[in-house]
Image (tube, grey):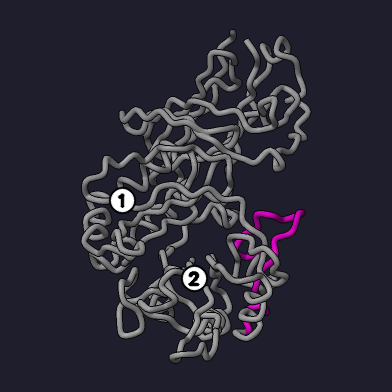
Amino acid sequence: MRQFYFPLIVAGTMLFSCSHEFEEPSLAQPNQNQNLALSASQWEGEVAEPLKVISRDERTIDKIMYPTTHNSFNYKGSRYDLENVYDNLPTQFAKGIRAVEIDIHEKTIYKFPFTIKKEIAVYHGKITNGSNGSEIARKVLQRITDFIEANPTEIVFLKIETTVSGSDIDKVLRDSHLDQHIYKRTADNPYPTPEDVIASGKRVITTRTIEGSKLYGPSLDRKTFGGKYSDNDDHQPQTSPSEKKFFSLDYYGVTSILGAGDDDRASYIMHPSRMGPFVEDVWKLNGRKPWRVNVDFPSIHNGNYYQVIKDNNAKAMLMGEVRDTDGNLLLKKDGSLIHWTWDCDYNSETVRATTSAEFSFPIEDDETVTIHPVSNDYDFVPQSVTVTSDNVSDFKQVFVAIPK
C-alpha cells in the first residue's frame, strides 16, 4: 500500500505504542466529511484527513479528571469508626474533592423489647445497621447542597450506593433540597462541557441509576477499573480496556473488615514515586484518560494526590477515532467497537496499548508523540501521526481503516 505522510506539528518530543477501547455503539455517528466515503482502492491516492487542533477549553466532563473519595461520608472522628477518609464532606470540598460516594441504608433503632423506629441513614455496610457509626441521610446530603449553593461555579459528581427504595431516595433528595440541583443529561448533549453544566443551574451530576427514583439522574456510561490495592500487589495498570466514555480508576487499599480504608496501604500506593507514574500508565496503556481517580485518605503525603490530578489535567490530549471508508466508527458484527493495538513512542519509551475505535493519549508540555494503529486485517490512512504539544491545545486525528 502507498505510504501516507502527516505533517509534524512542532512543540516537543514523545513516542508510544498503544491499543484501547472507546465509544459506545449508540454514540457512533457518521462522519460528514465526504472524503471518507471512498472505496479502499480510491483511498490509495487520497490524502489523510487533517489533524484537528482543539482548544482545551472545549473539553467535555468525561475528558477531565476529578478528585474523588471512596466512601466519602466515612470520616475519621467521633461520628464513624473504621474510616475511609480523614475529613468530613465540607473539609473535603474545601480541599478540592469534586466527586463523592454516599452509602444510604435503612437503620432500625431498637429499644428492648420493641423496635421504636426506622430511619434512612448513611453508614457503611447494611449488615452493621450503623453500629460502626451512622448519620441521618438528609443531613449528609444537605452538606452537598450547602456547598453547591455557596459555590455557583462548582460541579459535584454524586454516586449513591443504596439498599432502600427509589421513593425513599427521592424523599431524602427533597428533604435535603438536593433535588433542585441535579443535572439531567440530554440526548442532544450527553457529554456537556463544565460551562454547559454551570449554565444550566443544575450542578450535581449523578453517576448511576437508582431503580424507582424519579429525581435521581440516569447513570453515566462508565467503566470502573482497579481497587483494593496493597503493597504486595503486582500493579497492572492495564486490565480491561473500556468502550465507555467515563473511565474510572479505583485506587485504594481496604481492610478485610467491612472494606474500611487502610491508611497504611494508602500511604504505600499513593506515595509520590508510585501514584503519579501509575495513573499515567493507566492512561497510556488503556487509551482512556481516567475521569475519576477514586481514593481513600487523599491528604496522605501532604495531598500529593491533588497534584497528580492537576498534572494530568494539564497534559494535552491526543484524541482520535478509527472509522471505516463510509465514515462510521468501526464496529464488530455484534455492534460493539473493534479493539485496536497502537504502537507509540514517548521519548524513546515504547508503549503498546489496547483500545477501541475511540482513544486519547497524554502529551506532556513540549513533548512529541507518534502513534500508529496495528492490525493484521486493515491498513490505515494515515499510517501514523506525530504531534508536538504547543502547551495550550488538544489534538484529534481520524484514522480510516481499509480492509487488506
Residue furthest front as drawn: 113
Instruction: Tell me, for residue 3, which label it has, or none.
Output: none
The secondary structure making up most of the magenta span is: loop
Contact flag, marks 2 and 1 (Cβ < 8 Å): no
What residue range appears in magenta?
Answer: 177-196
The CA distance from mark 2 to mark 1 is 21 Å
x, y percentage for residue 36? 73, 25
Quarter holding residue 11: top left
Q: Is residue 100 placed above or below 149 in the rendered structure?
A: above
- Of label 2 and label 1, which has the lower sequence position? 2
Q: What residue lies at 62% left-to-right and 74% top-to-bottom?
A: 169
Q: What residue lies at 29% left-to-right and 60% top-to-bottom?
A: 255
Q: Which residue is at the front of the view, 25 or 322?
A: 25
Instruction: Tell me, for residue 102, which label it has, or none.
Output: 2
Q: Is residue 142 placed above or below 204 in the rendered structure?
A: below
Q: What residue lies at 56% left-to-right and 81% top-to-bottom?
A: 145
x, y percentage for residue 402? 65, 16
* Residue annotated with mark 1: 229
Residue 68 vs residue 275: left or right?
A: right
Q: Which residue is at the front of the view, 82 or 200?
A: 82
Q: Which residue is at the front of the view, 117 or 119?
A: 117
Q: What residue type is labelled 1?
A: Tyr
Q: What residue lies at 61% left-to-right and 55% top-to-bottom?
A: 220
Q: Check disc 2 and report its element: helix, strand or loop.
A: strand
Q: How crowded is mark 2: few (under 14 residues within 10 Å), some or many (20 or more)?
A: many
Q: Is residue 290 placed above or below 184 in the rendered structure?
A: above
